[in-house]
Amino acid sequence: MRAPALGVGATLGIPALAAATTWVTLTAWRDFVAQPSSYLDGLAVVAVVVAGLGTLLRWRGAPRAVTVLAQAVAVAALVCYQVTGSPVFVGAPGAELWGSLEVAVDSARTFAAPIGPGAPPVWPLLLVSGAGFLLLVDVVAATLRRVPGAGLVLLAVYAVPSGLLEDGPGAAPFAVAALGFLLMLHLDSREGLRRWGRGVGPSGDDVRWVRTNPVLDAARAGAGRIGVGATVLALAVPAFIPTLGVDLLDLGNRSGDGDIRIRKPVADMRRDLERDVDIPMLTVETDDPSPSYLRISVLHRFTGQEWSSGDRDVAREDKADGELPAPAGMTTAVPRRSYAYEVRVTEDFDSTWLPTQFPAAAVTAEGDWRFDPDTMDFLAADDGDTRDLTYRMIGLEPRYGTDGRFFRDAATGAVPDDMLELPDSLPEMVRALAREVTDEATNDYERALLLQRWFRRDGGFVYDLRRAPDGTGNNTLEAFLSEDGRVGYCEQYASAMAVMARTLGIPARVAVGFLEPDRISPTTWEYSSHDLHAWPELYFAGAGWVRFEPTPAGRVDAVPAYSRVAVGGDADSDDPAAGPGGAQPSESAPTAAPSVTPSTAPREAASGVDDGPAGASGRTILVLLAALAGAVIVAGASLGPRALRRRQRQRRLDDGPEQVWAELRATAADLRLDWPEGRSPAAVGEALGAHLTDHGGEDATSALARIVAEVERGRYARPGSVSTLERTTLREDAGTVTAALEASAGKAARRRATWAPLSVWSGGREPRR
């Protein structure tokens, strides 16, 4: 059965849109793996092959069955080649492909998402599944011409992470996929109306008729108004449902007024530790000579599967607006030192939990930030977050000494009951091991010291992020504590020590935050994503909640002085090799896992030179990749710089004088006008003013003078001086000057500035002074 001929737009547009839309939708699966490129790169090639081959066969009038069969064979050969190195998907390569899928399925069942490079690769499963969806969407939308049915297939792709990932997929893949689907509907509806015959009315040269063409109006009504309205509702309505909420670390979710719940922060912490790029998150200005632990949240409920904070009911009066209550359980006899901190959060750290020192004497932050009196962690009670936030606090450093006089056993009822609760399903070996490790202790303080020393030195543990098990549940805990386990990272160490402390009757919880910042000036420090850490906090009468550090020296080199007290004649040491059973840190214990793309041996073998069928197929793949890359480069070179330049101008003009000055410099660079480098604003203004006098008139010259005055005031005026120029006036002056500069240039210069702006690469900013 042959398909009737289509118009050129539908013949070329629908398959291309189907492939691109499906590929974008498949990016919703990226949170299944730590390295999404492991499957997305291969699917990009599959998308090109499916769309290109299908378009060619349909254009040549091939029967539908032949088209679908040819596409299926090509996809199978391509996927087999990517996984095994051979395009032959029968015989030994087919068996190898099937074996890779079985390994991927087992890995998906065993490890929690996102699956890192240390686990058996799961990308073959995602590759095969994604290729199937790419083929199915093309068949439904382009071959069978049932574009609305293709929407159901795309919805199925998007539904996979919705059902399997707790956080679900992001809104971006949905929005872009919805746009692609609407464009497919538009082309399909216009093609359907075209088959009714020619439109009645004046010729196509009549612009008025084009604007009222009934075919275009019908297409817009069907695919545009209804579709766009539905998409906007799909994206907007969830924002008003109180049970939904996300943030960068997924440390918090708001549900109702002040009812806040933590969602798997340690899992998200591991994801950020495994990032190839170390992302700056906080900058701290402080008089503390060696700042370290900065706490984000506290997890005090252990269910046997995970640690969580449970539900929080935060009172309206407990706000971060100054002085805080005294630290719970800490006697006033404990000497303490206070330090001032000013914290500036980058735009990359989006959290509803406020990183603070613990204990702290005062915290002041703009917005509705509230603290939980039981844990003294801070969280947003409204829609606020930490991005670009600046706040201040006074941190306390207790001086407990090394004689243990402030560490008394906690009395019954001193802390909430959930700080001691353990699930009935907790393995008995955990309780027995805790008693065995602390057998020689005479009080809870000594038991805590022995637990820490056992994890860091005597137990033979090593820190290894790549080989660390996933999760903190009972099964993971039992395997981690067994003699053939004992390899993990801070998540397992903090969880294990807290659980073992509770089995001994010591109140314990897990804290998540930052470990140790990098020093960037004598009083300025920077915390980044690779500084994320977890540690246990134990409660003692007289000392209150106290931090311990069971993570070995492969990650944490030093422990608090109060935790190096001798027990049974043997003191703890920061040297992992000290004492009996000291375990050297693993050589493979970096903070962040290296950039390794999951691979299989067959894929590596396929990289060799071969003139046989595999080599020919490899050359075909390279040609397709080159064509795809060429198309992307052409589109990016044509549209990317122009769009980026527009965004840069909008952002700068909405900012202060320095950014406006940077925009003027960028405009001059784009137009190839002289800009005196290394000169003062007044000198630069004189040079530009001479140019504007000839081309821009008095208005542009006066506007430039006002901008120069604002820049000089910002750079050289005394701190605290107030600007005399309104922000709207500054923006208007900048617009007047840039318009005059552009008017002074020729048409060729303006075209170059529009399509090949130099400032996109140079940045358009003055050198650092």
Image (tube, helix red, strand yellow):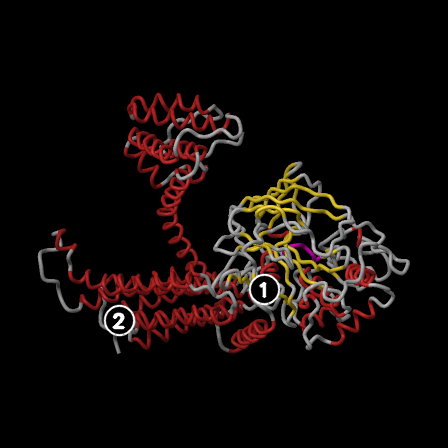
344 is higher (above) or lower (below) than 748: below
**Which residue is found at the position 53% from the left and 50% from the top?**
386
- Decide: few, some or many residues near mark 2? Use Cα within 10 Å; few <14, some 14-19, many ≥20: some
- Disc 2 versus disc 1: distance between alpha carbons? 54 Å
Q: Is residue 24 visible?
A: no
Range of the magenta residues? 588-592
Q: In the image, 514: left or right of 451? A: left
Residue 264: numbered disc: 1
Image x and y of residue 590, in percent: 67, 55
Q: Earlier in the sequence, mark 2 or mark 1?
A: 2
Image x and y of residue 188, in percent: 26, 66
Please tell me whether mark 2 sits on a helix, a strand or a loop: loop
671 is higher (above) or lower (below) than 470: above
Residue hosting label 2: 61
Please tell me whether mark 1 sits on a helix, a strand or a loop: loop
Tag in front: 2 or 1: 1
Q: Quadrant of residue 291?
A: top right
500 is higher (above) or lower (below) than 281: below
Q: Quadrant of the N terminus?
A: bottom left
Residue 546: numbered disc: none
Q: Amino acid at mark 2?
A: Gly
